[in-house]
Amino acid sequence: MKKITFILSIAVIVIFSSTAAFAAGDTGKIWDELLKITEKCTDNVSYIMETKSGAAGQPATTKMKFFFKDVKNYRVDTEVEGQKTRMVYAGGKAWVYVEAQNVVTNMDPAGVESINIKEALEKQKENADASEGKSGSSVTYTIIERETKNKTVFTVDPKMAIYTKMQVYDGKGDLLTEAVYTDWKFGKIGADVFDKPKGAKEMDMPAQGKPESK
């Protein structure tokens, strides 16, 4: 169960990091542009994201494939240290599938709903400053949280209007995580993408504070 919770945490953190670009609100040219890009990148699209982490105790590399119908219906396939999992939030329900165990764990969807872009906007308003820059032919957007000084740098392909890279730094300027986005495919995401694997065993994640049954 700890592994399942860890995998879920990775997915939530990664998706929320993308939505946190709007921390200072949706006014102004930079925020408007980031909002348009992120809405495009969560609307009937699939893509691959590979992350490298410099944080102690975290896996060195993580590979994820995202399938977004919209921000309320998505799937994240994750591979961490050889372990493959799938997290789905669709139709108001959430579950995680661990391939090696062939087990689907049904989860409380409340813990996943918090990554909604609009809700993130409301919760994080006016906590950060944004600036725009250039990196070769790409555009960069730097978001710095006023209190912690944590910094997130998004690199964008201006022609395709998609993210190509994300770098997260702590207040000291040390790189915590770098993510590279590839294999963008835009097109209708069908309902079957969110189906549970046939033949998998099912269980419910124990309620918080209750011991897990063996």
Image: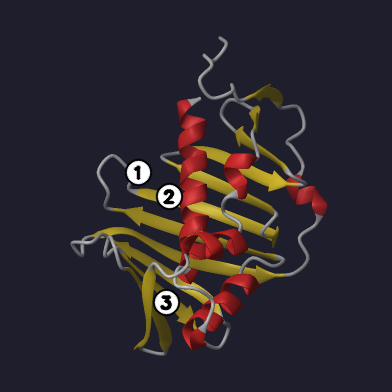
Q: What amino acid does circle 1 point to? A: Pro
Pointer 3 or 1: first along the chain: 1
Provide the residue designation for mark 3: 155
Mark 1, other Cα within 10 Å: few <14 / some 14–19 / many ≥20: few
The disc at residue 62 is 2
Q: Answer yes or no: do the residues labelled 1 and 2 have beta carbons within 8 Å?
A: yes
162 shown above or below 181: below
Q: Quadrant of residue 140?
A: bottom left
Secondary structure type for disc 1: loop
117 shown above or below 142: above
Q: Residue at x 57, y 75 (%)?
A: 35
Q: Is 103 on the left-hand or right-hand side of 195?
A: left
Question: Of residues 167 and 184, which is closer to you in this image?
Answer: 167
Question: Of residues 191 and 79, which is closer to you in this image?
Answer: 191
**In x, y percent, where is residue 32?**
55, 82
Image quadrant holding the C terminus, namely top right
Provide the residue designation for mark 1: 59
Q: Is 124 on the left-hand or right-hand side of 39?
A: left
Q: Quadrant of residue 65?
A: bottom right
